[in-house]
Amino acid sequence: QVQLVESGGGLVQAGGSLRLSCAASGRSFSTHVMAWFRQAPGKEREFVAVISWSGGSTYYADSVKSRFTISRDNGKNTVYLQMNSLKREDTAVYYCAASGSSGFQTTPDAYDYWGQGTQVTVSS
């Protein structure tokens, strides 16, 4: 069992940066693939980034590649999402998710555990 709590969201101007954190509880955090998803009003939840259990491999949605960086610290049971050069279209609720399966999955139904989400709003 893994419980996830996101933090770090807020209001930022376009071009600015934010760092999201996802704190996990549970002894099996380091064996889970971790991902970030986001959901804008009226839209489906979409994949943002994923990181392997060791942190050695990552994969990003094309829309955020080169602007966002996912990382993890297994000693602190935390996964991060550094977001730079933010755009208005990045506005959404951002969710942290964990999967006990191997491999990189980009669909929400592949993930077993979810946080409650943190709001990111980018103004022009």
Image (cartoon, rainbow, N blue to C red):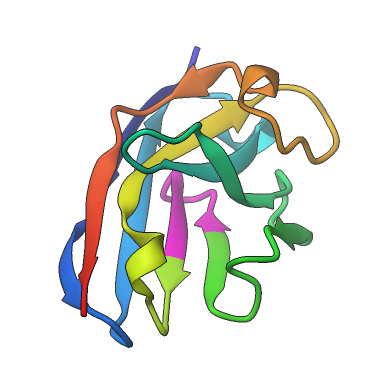
Q: Which residues are magenta?
A: 72-81
Q: Nearer the viewer, residue 74 or 119?
A: 119
Left or right, residue 119 beside residue 11? right
At x 80%, y 41%, the residue is 104
Q: Residue furthest front?
A: 42
State whether the magenta stretch is mostly helix, strand or loop: strand
Please tell me in which quadrant of the rendered image residue 86 appears: bottom left
At x 31%, y 38%, the residue is 41
Left or right, residue 89 beside residue 111? left
Q: Residue furthest top?
A: 1
Please tell me in which quadrant of the rendered image residue 4 appears: top left
- Looking at the image, is 83 positioned above or below residue 93? below
Left or right, residue 116 beside residue 74? left
How many numbered dots are placed on residues in this image?
Answer: 0
Residue 27 at x, y = what percent? 51, 24
Q: Is residue 80 magenta?
A: yes
Left or right, residue 56 beside residue 34? right
Residue 99 at x, y = what percent? 65, 26
- Looking at the image, is 118 positioned above or below residue 71? above
At x 76%, y 35%, the residue is 105
Please tell me in which quadrant of the rendered image residue 77 appears: top left
Residue 40 at x, y = what percent? 36, 43
